[in-house]
Amino acid sequence: MNFRLTRYAVLIALFVSLYSLAQAEENKYFKSFSQDTFKIETLAQPAVTAAFSNWVTKPDGFGSGAEGFGYHYGVALADNVNGKFMRKLVFAAASGHVDEYHPKESGNFFGRLMNAAGHSIFVDPQADHKSFNWSALPASFSSAALSTAYQPSVQQTWQAALQRAATNSAGYLVGDLFTEFRSAACVIPFLRPVLRCKQ
């Protein structure tokens, strides 16, 4: 079967499933996905990623200059939404757990670090009965696999897909670390509105 035809079939299947989930407005997983997706960060973060990729790391297959930046931005935007779709909707609904991190916000540094790292394995590392977090590593690998469909042909390899999966997993951990230690930066007055600190 033609790879391009497969790519379009996968994307159409995703949109159809997304539309059917959207029909149930009370769906907590769709609400989590839509709230996380329809934010300015969804458009801004890929621009930073695209600029870094285009002018610093320069992976093969994207081109250079404005055209390269545009290609990088399109792929980064698709990756951003793809990752949120996998984490917040698909794997969250399949596992029955909304993907959200609950920081300790107190205690020693190592305990807080382990809480953030533990969220990559467990839904709630602080709970007595731990459940596997399907929205972490499995979603990272699935998102990386789907990303192969719209990457340049040079990036459609096992090595590149595994590198994307590792990057996705690291990004998930960094996000949890940021959430865990955000309160430490909130003591600086001008950072409070930027970090959306609790007053």
Image (cartoon, rainbow, N blue to C red):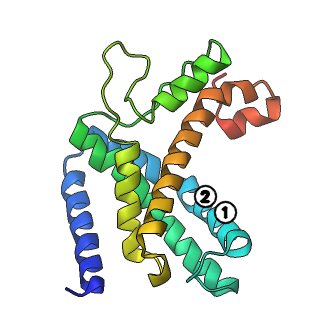
Q: Position of residue 62 (x, y in %)?
A: 58, 82
How many marks on residues? 2
Quadrant that contains the C terminus: top right
Residue 126, placed above or below residue 66: above
Does residue 94 appear anywhere in the picture?
Answer: yes
Residue 129 placement: quadrant: top left
Q: Secondary structure at mark 2?
A: helix
Q: Is residue 84 left or right of residue 3?
A: right
- Residue in the image at 81% along x and 29% along y: 189
What label does residue 194 carry, if any? none
Residue 35, placed above or below residue 80: above
Quadrant that contains the N terminus: bottom left
Residue 88, placed above or below residue 141: above
- Residue in the image at 45% along x and 36% along y: 120
- Residue in the image at 62% along x and 14% along y: 106
Q: Position of residue 127 (x, y in %)?
A: 38, 16
Q: Which residue is mark 2?
A: 45
Q: Position of residue 154 (x, y in %)?
A: 49, 82
Q: Which residue is mark 1?
A: 48
Residue in front for this viewpoint, 135 or 138: 138
Q: Is residue 199 left or right of residue 30?
A: right
